[in-house]
Image: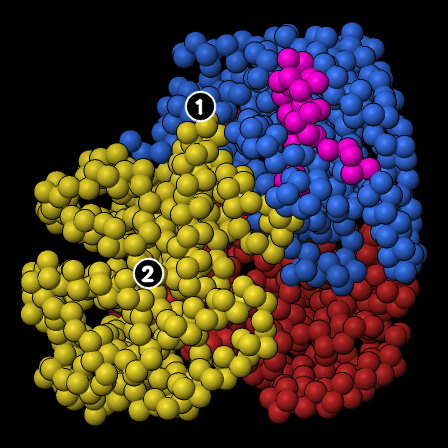
Chain colours: A yellow, B blue, C red
């Protein structure tokens, strides 16, 4: 047995994550610390195997169903890559080409697409109070379908971004941090600044800042959430962050200044998002079909945004971070000043300097998704990893 | 050898279906009873293998081409599932993204997409006299292509719904009936009511009622077709039903009352469809580019439909069926009163009660499609099933 | 070892093509003659294996990314077929469903979609000076991504048609010629006429005529490029053709008459294209957003085209070719007089007579693409072919 792979297996064997088997992945804070660590460990192990040209195909056939209710490149490709890595074929449910418009229920559609499905990945992040609820409806429907003998297996649901959390993104971000700092054990006392940043676009989802404070407070770090007045995130998630920080021996604080958040930070995550209250209002306006109201709201929000153009991750601000070298994070694509817009979230020179680490950050996402599926579908994941190595099938012919 | 699988193999060995090899599947009544039974048997065998985690991949590579000329969720996913089950990758021919608009012929396109294709699945159900004919053009083209050395193999054509029949749907319905009644041998003398039902939408294809009377009259049942005046189906298919009934020792009758059709029925299939004559007229209007005429026709038909809102599968009607417990069938999605529309094909409480069996009914479709492909592509299907078990490759890693 | 396969392997072993490993395929004239021959040889070998039901799957998992910036049927399916033949799953980057509109850079997108990608195939042929350059940007981006540890492998880029060349098409055309003439060694002194032909549509890419004169001048043939005044192709490519002809002992000449080009020709390739100068002008107009200017240009070009309706591949012209039996080529779909348009590139009776060879011509394209991938991804392609035969895995279960 390869000693590095053995290390991953030993780590897994020391963790309790039995309940992930046949489970789903909605929000990181619904998972225990052991479960979170199991995802990271399996992600690293799968990457290790692939990088050593060992096939990690655990499905000879089977489908990964994707439902994207918002445009997506990287999450779409990450999901496709994860499925491919494990042997699943992707079948996208394009709601425009389906009969769903005919008044079909979620319960029905969920079963109809799942006869051969091992996983369903959903992105639904547009409306507050909707996306996560929709995912639960789908998961409940296939759980019933399995119980009623309709489905031969219960596909596992993977949240590819909802209105509350973006677990595959934030766990990829976190695994990147762990690698950059040489292990989760080195994170205690480190300062992470999750800060709002200006963008000329409006209405970016809250799931990334929420996901970040909901996850990264679990590692003993000092997590600061900074934003201009009025750009609050969901209070329930702040509460989660507070509880996490207390339990992990770190802290969770808020402040109204980017400069203060950046000062001595080890890690910075400057990113635009829409105010929670405005997103709630927009959801209500949509519900009421009040499109004039939506237009008015958008104008109001853009004007409000424009008052905060100084919330930009500049070289000056970066200099104030720990040794002037904080790890800069972003879920991408970023609004880069002078590149994709006149004024944006980040200065072009900062972004350029961090380009390679940013892309590496993104490179963890397929493995995180694959690990979530692996843990839900393999009865004994540690044994499965060992068996993959023993099988020794080449990923690419040599 | 597993005794249940051996049972399927023995049954296959007692049937004559040699002509299915390298053949196509257009209409159920073009197939012998042995051939129909072979499809059911292989479908059951493939399902049995998959449910016991034995891979049924008979293709290491190869494509399943799909052409959907109408929106589709469940047939699209059933086809994708069937292909995946056998090892084929699905490649959809999206006519909007292709150069077909440039005046390319069917003959040419059919060959151009088939260089690696083992199967072509087509849904084309919108115009009377068109869909089935189009499928034959495609099958003829690839047959020529094979003969001329253009193609390495002739892909098998599977009708995923045409203007005449919906064989994968009706065979899934039928296999569901067989399972519910504990075997085809228990169906003699059972009463099946294929009845029209009201729907606020207009122009639903006739292929389901036609497919049902064309197939289900082959099992010795008393099949009743009921609809309001003017909602006739294609006379040729009624003729098929009559001949089938005579040959199988059952009956085929027509009536103009849902209540009469339901009385003492063992199985009911209430479903909306458009009048055949109106569909023919619409086809002609399209041909002539008379869009005002089409609008006028639609209004007329909706008004005509609205006179028959009482054709609904209510609890009262269900009580009049055999022991009040007829098996309720639908191809889905159904128009459910008070759920997807004010007045529809079925009462919400009836639909809810039958939800699990309805979804199980749908679950047979992927296996039916896979069986059609298997029988067209395996020289000795019984031996292939035995070899799959002997190979013992796990579908999902354990 | 099968002697025919051994022949292919021996031929490969006599060629130098080491630099293709981990390389890309942009333009045929950037490749040495040995490299071109290696592609033909591997294409033939892969076809031989597949036609003998031996799996050529060299990837257990992995993605083939496709980016089509123009409609496509046959290239799309050829790419999908090639990927499938080698074991890769296709994931299409549909720019409409992605976030690319948000101002994301090519560099970023290229990396984001490539975490599991072994190949990226791109079609981008609409604007002079753009397509090839875009492909290089993508290839440069993933080369950097590989170097920076973002990507586990550098996907190979395959040009599926750019503004300059259409290498997969022209190499398929050429392999067809080689097979029809019984070997490349029989082509010396043969006359090939690449001629413009009339089409009622406007603005067809120049990549086919350019690709043809850039490739087919390498085999000692007398290549004639014929077109009406004003329909010149890119001068740089004519220069390539001249150099090639000189090196191969053939010739490259131009003339302004279809009749002259056809006289005694062994091979004819009559096909419409847009004037290079007009394409450049159109690119500039697009750049300037001058849509009225574009409309005016289109009208002008259609009028100019219409003066040359006599440039049609008629039976009379075909009679003037070598023994009246020149091999007629086309990349398809062709504009056929009286079939897809009133006046077109070719007479219906000529097209019909050559239909089977035309479709065979097209049938080489999936194998050419697969060979390009194989040579870029297999360290020792000859050994890999031998290993595939030794493995003896059936493509289709028997």
Q: Which residue is mark 2?
A: A165
Query: Magenta residues, as a range?
Result: B308-335
Q: Is residue C302 left or right of residue A193?
A: right
Q: Residue A309 in the image: x percent, y percent?
A: 35, 90
Q: Are marks 2 and 1 on the same chain?
A: no
Residue B314 falls within the magenta-colored stretch = yes
The part of the image, by quadrant, that contains residue B116 is: top right
Is residue B312 shown above or below B149?
A: above
Nearer to us in this view, B228 or C315: B228
Q: Kindly tell me whether residue C173 is visible in this rendering.
A: no
> Is the stretch drawn in magenta largely helix, strand or loop?
loop
Q: Residue A339 in the image: x percent, y percent?
A: 40, 87
Q: Kindly tell me whether residue C126 is visible in this rendering.
A: yes
Which of the chains bears the disc numbered 2? A
Q: Residue C363 in the image: x percent, y percent?
A: 63, 51
Q: Which residue occupies 86% across, 52% down? A: B299
Q: Which residue is mark 1?
A: B49
The part of the image, by quadrant, that contains residue A73 is: bottom left
């Amino acid at each position: 047995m390869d000693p590095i792979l053995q290390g991953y297996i030993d780590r897994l064997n020391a963790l309790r994550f039995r309940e992930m088997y046949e489970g789903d992945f909605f929000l990181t804070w619904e998972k225990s610390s052991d479960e979170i660590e199991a995802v990271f460990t399996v992600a690293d192990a799968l990457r290790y195997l692939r990088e050593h040209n060992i096939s990690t195909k655990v499905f000879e056939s089977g489908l990964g169903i994707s439902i994207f209710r918002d445009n997506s490149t990287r999450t779409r490709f990450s999901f496709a890559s994860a499925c491919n890595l494990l042997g699943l074929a992707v079948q996208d449910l394009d709601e425009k080409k389906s009969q769903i418009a005919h008044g079909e229920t979620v319960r029905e559609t969920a079963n109809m697409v799942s006869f051969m499905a091992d996983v369903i990945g959903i992105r639904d992040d547009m409306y507050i109070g909707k996306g996560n609820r929709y995912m639960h409806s789908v998961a409940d429907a296939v759980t019933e379908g399995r119980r009623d003998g309709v489905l031969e297996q219960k596909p596992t649901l993977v949240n590819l971004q909802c209105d509350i959390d973006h677990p595959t993104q934030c766990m990829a971000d976190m695994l990147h941090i762990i690698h950059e700092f040489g292990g989760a054990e080195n994170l205690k006392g480190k300062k992470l600044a999750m800060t709002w940043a200006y963008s000329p676009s409006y209405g970016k989802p809250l799931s990334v800042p929420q996901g970040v404070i909901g996850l990264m407070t679990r590692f003993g770090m000092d997590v600061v959430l900074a934003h201009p007045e009025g750009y609050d995130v969901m209070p329930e998630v702040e509460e989660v962050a507070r509880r996490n920080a207390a339990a992990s021996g770190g802290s969770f604080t808020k402040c109204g200044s980017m400069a203060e958040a950046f000062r001595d930070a080890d890690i910075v995550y400057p990113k635009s998002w829409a105010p929670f209250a405005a997103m709630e209002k927009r959801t209500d306006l949509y519900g009421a079909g009040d499109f004039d109201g939506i237009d008015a709201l958008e104008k109001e929000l853009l004007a409000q945004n424009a008052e905060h153009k100084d919330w930009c991750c500049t070289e000056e601000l970066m200099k104030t971070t720990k040794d002037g070298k904080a790890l800069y994070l972003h879920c991408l694509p970023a609004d880069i000043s002078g590149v994709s817009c006149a004024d944006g979230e980040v200065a072009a020179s900062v972004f350029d300097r961090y380009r390679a680490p940013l892309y590496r950050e993104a490179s963890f996402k397929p493995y995180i998704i694959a690990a979530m599926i692996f843990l839900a579908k393999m009865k004994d994941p540690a044994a499965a990893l060992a068996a993959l190595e023993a099988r020794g099938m080449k990923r690419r012919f040599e």
